[in-house]
Amino acid sequence: MSEDKPHQNLAVIGHVDHGKSTLVGRLLYETENVPEHVIEQHKEEAEEKGKGGFEFAYVMDNLAEERERGVTIDIAHQEFDTDEYYFTIVDCPGHRDFVKNMITGASQADNAVLVVAADDGVQPQTQEHVFLARTLGIDEMIIAVNKMDLVDYEEGRYEQTKDEVEDLLNQVRFDTDSVKYIPVSAFEGDNVASESENTPWYDGEILLEALNNLPEPSPPTDADLRLPIQDVYTISGIGTVPVGRVETGVLNTGDNVSFQPSDVSGEVKTIEMHHEEVPKAEPGDNVGFNVRGIGKDDIRRGDVCGPADDPPSVAETFQAQVVVMQHPSVITAGYTPVFHAHTAQVACTIESIDKKIDPASGETAEEDPDFIQSGDAAVVTVRPQKPLSIEPSSEIPELGSFAIRDMGQTIAAGKVLSVNE
Ligand code: GDP
């Protein structure tokens, strides 16, 4: 698989059981990106049993098993390529904490495929994911109207599902100009990698074409360096080695960098990527690097590395737009759940609920509400209980979104509007 092609981070979203995993499996299979060991294992077993058989179903079983084993891994990346792009599925579909990963994942989604089953239509998680996609700034969406085989490939059922999704997108004011709808069967492979004979009434793009024709995301190399730290190691002969992924900007050897909120700085001596020394690292690169004079206890996971002369901001308080997804009761001022932003996890107090927003129009629905609950969108003022480096989403989107977790689940998501340092 060529790594030279431009990268796309793709989110596959949609209601449970509508076929996200199956569609990803189908995409990996059709683009010949199913891991070699899965194919080898298949060949052996098929030979033993003396049957050729249904390869795709087998591949799906194996991918499902891999997924089961991978549940403890924060993000299990799956990858495939088309003629134009190298795609990383930002979240492993079916992962139990999809929403948190969608926000704090090592890589944020550029675009999304929304899977909606033709036999079931728009469901609560379809709504929730579309709302999130809009809140978090996903620009392009491809709608896969899936399970067409279950509705006998009827055009009427496709149109009906399409209309439901269109209503939903209009409700949340998603810019629908470039949205594409495609009737597919992930299981049978219709209109995924080749045109299906079962949908003669459809003459639009098939899924791989639509993925190929997505606009190229502009790599945020012009922005200031932002590199959230995932871990800090001590390596003999080198010293302290923070590791993380460059979100924006460029890290060069010789640069003076600052770590916030730990508030230490120094000069970058060496940068290493894939066990090789490199002179610089760009957005998307996972690197380990070494900074003159910085000890292991000076910095920690959750710090953000940026230029020393324009360091990442540390929020005394910040204002944010949040969407409450699932909270058993109500959220009032004073509530202090854990916020997950990039690699940081910090308890933060919601100091005030400034206004409730109408999710459909984005307009103020109520000033100073007493509480918010599931389904509400609101602007809130937040005070981190420990120093937290976070940025307005309009300036650095990669460091401007967060998930709010409590009781073992993601209860809300949001983006930062402004930061008071
Ligand atoms: P997810 O929860 O959205 O990831 O859904 P899955 O991919 O796990 O699919 C849920 C169920 O629907 C599984 O039993 C799949 O085999 C089935 N399924 C997925 N896509 C299709 C399809 O296109 N046609 C049919 N008939 N079944 C499908």
Image (cartoon, helix red, strand yellow):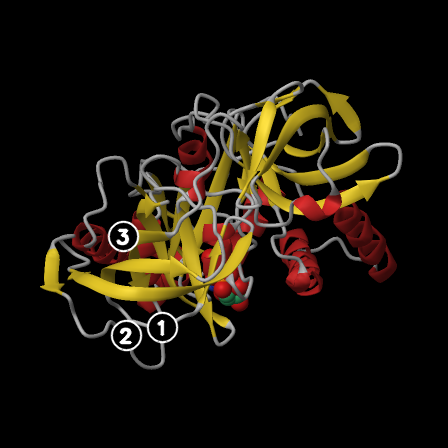
Q: Identity of the amino acid at label 1? A: Tyr
Instruction: Check disc 1 and report the residue beneath it.
Output: 335
Write down the quadrant of residue 259 in the picture.
Answer: top right
Q: Which mark is residue 155?
A: 3
Marks 3 and 1, Cα distance to the nearest angstrom? Answer: 49 Å
Marks 2 and 1, Cα distance to the nearest angstrom? Answer: 6 Å
* Nearer-the-camera pick, 176 or 233: 233
What is the quadrant of the C terminus in the image? top left
The tag earlier along the polypeptide, 2 or 3, is 3
Q: Are marks 2 and 1 in contact (CB under 8 Å)?
A: yes
Q: Position of residue 64 (x, y in %)?
A: 64, 61
Q: Position of residue 101 (x, y in %)?
A: 51, 55
Query: Exactly how many numbered labels are in the figure?
Result: 3
Q: Identity of the amino acid at label 2? A: Thr
| 3 or 1: mark nearer the eye | 1
- Image vertical order of residue 409 relative to residue 360, above or below: below
Q: Identity of the amino acid at label 3? A: Glu
For the point 51% across and 48% down, which residue is it? 342
